[in-house]
Image: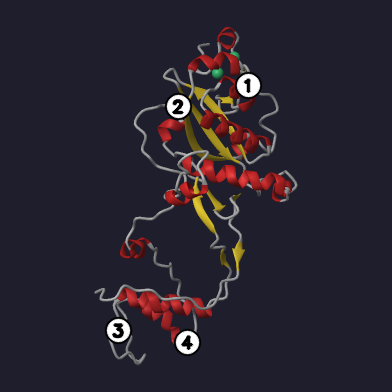
Amino acid sequence: MSNECSSCCLDCLQTTPGTQPSSSDSPYALHNLLQAGTLTLDISPDVRNVICDHNHAEDEWHTFDATPLIPLLNDSQTIEFCREMGFLMQQHFLSITYRCLDNQKMILRVYLIPYDLGNVQGKLRVRKDNILNPAKRYLRNLLPRISQDFGRWKGSLSIESGKKLIPGMPVRESFFSPHFLFLKSLKDSRTLSDIYSDLRSPLVSPVEGLGNIASRLLGFEDNLEGLGMRVKLYNYQRLSIAAMLQKELDFKDVPDPLYISLKTIDGKDFYLQLGTVEVLQHCPMTAPGRGGILCEELGQA
Ligand SMILES: [Zn+2]
Ligand SMILES: [Zn+2]
């Protein structure tokens, strides 16, 4: 049988490497985790013989282990980054597999471990601060770097699409950057008008009651006769009023707005709380707040 793995060392090539036993029934088996995307490191292909554990992970790549790799690296930033990944793997925040390519590149597949993973008795939700605090720092460094290029996930270095796991999240400029550099990277060059046009309009569902006003507003062919309107409303204004009515009258729970919705490489939804860097498979629901601010650009026709 031919071995197509470009990470296999000379020993592996003589004895087809096995797949790690028991990996498929563990709650941490790769198929239970979230395929976040890839990272690419500049690492000499010579190291593959030294770091090889002669085993294939469930995805046929090799399990990344920072410990044997770190002493072989010269670049302090890559060393620090590998150390951080080692910590996150050890503490069950993520799993990583790798493949070495011949041109000094190593592609890492990053699998995120959601806090609400099944069959771990909820223990990922109750981690101590001495684990959580460094993990948050490391994840804020790592997550914005994750690429969601499909070719790269498959192990190809062809032109990268540039699609990121979290679009718009700034990458820290240097792994050792002082805090002001981090702030500088957060600087936003958009104009106020750009920011307004980036805001998504709320999705409106008509609330019942009040003479069915909300449904009438959303049915654009309805001329709203009998509602006492003195001016003709534009469609976007009708949407705004229906949204305000929903905000005041609808008491149904809504997805917690602190979580942003993201997708894995294979199209599964998952949720990230940016403040705490908590990753969940299911978005928690919360009671909606009443009131709000209605923003509209002046003079818009
Ligand atoms: Zn291999
Ligand atoms: Zn090997």
Q: Nearer the viewer, residue 79 or 204?
A: 79
In what quadrant does ligand 1 lie? top right
At horizontal 30% and vertical 81% (from top left) the residue drawn is 233
Q: Secondary structure at mark 2?
A: loop
Q: Secondary structure at mark 3?
A: loop
N-terminal label among 4 and 3: 4
Q: Nearer the viewer, residue 207 or 126?
A: 126
Q: Residues within 10 Å of mark 4 (few under 14, many from 20)?
A: few
Q: Residues within 10 Å of mark 2 (few under 14, many from 20)?
A: some
N-terminal label among 2 and 1: 1
CA distance separating discs 2 and 4: 58 Å
CA distance separating discs 2 and 1: 22 Å
Question: Of tags 2 and 1, which is closer to the observer?
Answer: 1
Question: Of tags 3 and 1, which is closer to the observer?
Answer: 1
N-terminal label among 3 and 2: 2
Question: Of tags 4 and 1, which is closer to the observer?
Answer: 1
N-terminal label among 2 and 4: 2
**What residue sits right under mark 4 in the picture?**
210
N-terminal label among 4 and 1: 1
**What residue sits right under mark 1 in the picture?**
68
N-terminal label among 3 and 1: 1
Horizontal and vertical percent position of residue 21: 69, 24
Q: Residues within 10 Å of mark 3 (few under 14, many from 20)?
A: few
Verify CB contact (< 8 Å) between mark 2 and mark 1: no
Verify CB contact (< 8 Å) between mark 3 and mark 1: no
CA distance separating discs 3 and 1: 72 Å
**What residue sits right under mark 2 in the picture?**
155
Residue 223 got which mark? 3
